[in-house]
Amino acid sequence: MLKIGVMVSGGGTNLQAIIDAMKSGVITNTEIKVVISNNKNAYALERAKNAGIEAVCVSPKDFPDRAAFNEAFLEKVDEYHLDLIVLAGFLVTLPEAMIQRYRNRIINIHPSLIPSFCGVGYYGLKVHEGALKRGVKITGATVHYVDEGVDSGPIILQKAVEVKEGDTPEILQRRVMEEAEWIILPQAINMIANQ
Ligand code: GAR
């Protein structure tokens, strides 16, 4: 049984996709041990509680500096003895010590076809704003392993999504979630759980 922890910052629709995929059997041999948010108001925490999953907040605001937050965050993650850490819309830069300790055991979902529209500054709607500004006709999502860089680790799965005439960043974001993110993130977890 793969023990996973899901790290979130916002709405948690990708977390919901994981929970639903576990219920429907798309993901097998997997247990969500904890959902951790940096933001106490994240709706993702409600989604976790509604599914009977332990939901925890570790906020930088509760610590005097970044180093203290990093230490507390890593200590909290370690408590759950996780096999895999899933970043599902987690908008905090991970402590370097965590990347080293969990090498090849952290995955992230990013809402573009990496290496397009990724790296520093590209997160959430900004990714889709960038894609629309550049005029790309195809975008998508990527699941990749996390290394020391930003969105630079080995790619696990990608799925393409069409950009349509008249798309706004919000419309495109929703299509990328529905047609790509909510599909490939559960698939990647299931692949890792059953490899
Ligand atoms: C998702 O679109 C995810 O790909 C993106 O944040 C959103 C979180 O939505 N992540 C990044 O941009 C990371 N660079 P959710 O909270 O509803 O799952």
Image: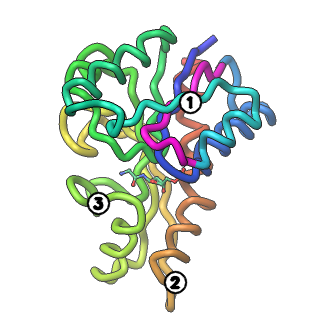
Q: Is residue 111 magenta?
A: no
How packed mark 3 is, by other alpha carbons closer than 10 Å (few <14, some 14-19, many 20 or more), is some
Say which amino acid is labelled 1.
Val
Label whose residue precedes the other's in the sequence (3 or 2) = 3
How packed mark 2 is, by other alpha carbons closer than 10 Å (few <14, some 14-19, many 20 or more), is some
Residue 17 relative to residue 63: left or right: right
Label whose residue precedes the other's in the sequence (1 or 2) = 1
Q: CA distance from mark 3 to mark 1?
A: 23 Å
Say which amino acid is labelled 2.
Lys
- The residue carrying mark 2 is 164
SS type, badge 1: strand
SS type, badge 3: loop
Residue 6 relative to residue 105: left or right: right
How packed mark 1 is, by other alpha carbons closer than 10 Å (few <14, some 14-19, many 20 or more), is many
Residue drawn where x is 60% and y is 19% of the image: 33
Q: Nearer the viewer, mark 1 or mark 2?
A: 1
Q: Residue furthest right?
A: 24
Magenta highlight range: 31-42
Q: Nearer the viewer, residue 74 or 88?
A: 74
Does the beta carbon at disc 3 come under 8 Å from ligand 1? yes
Residue 122: image location, x then y, percent? 29, 60
- The residue carrying mark 1 is 35
Residue drawn where x is 64% and y is 11% of the image: 1
Based on the displayed image, in which of its 4 quarters is residue 148 positioned? top left
Height in image: 4 above or below 51? above
Height in image: 137 above or below 189? below
Label whose residue precedes the other's in the sequence (3 or 1) = 1
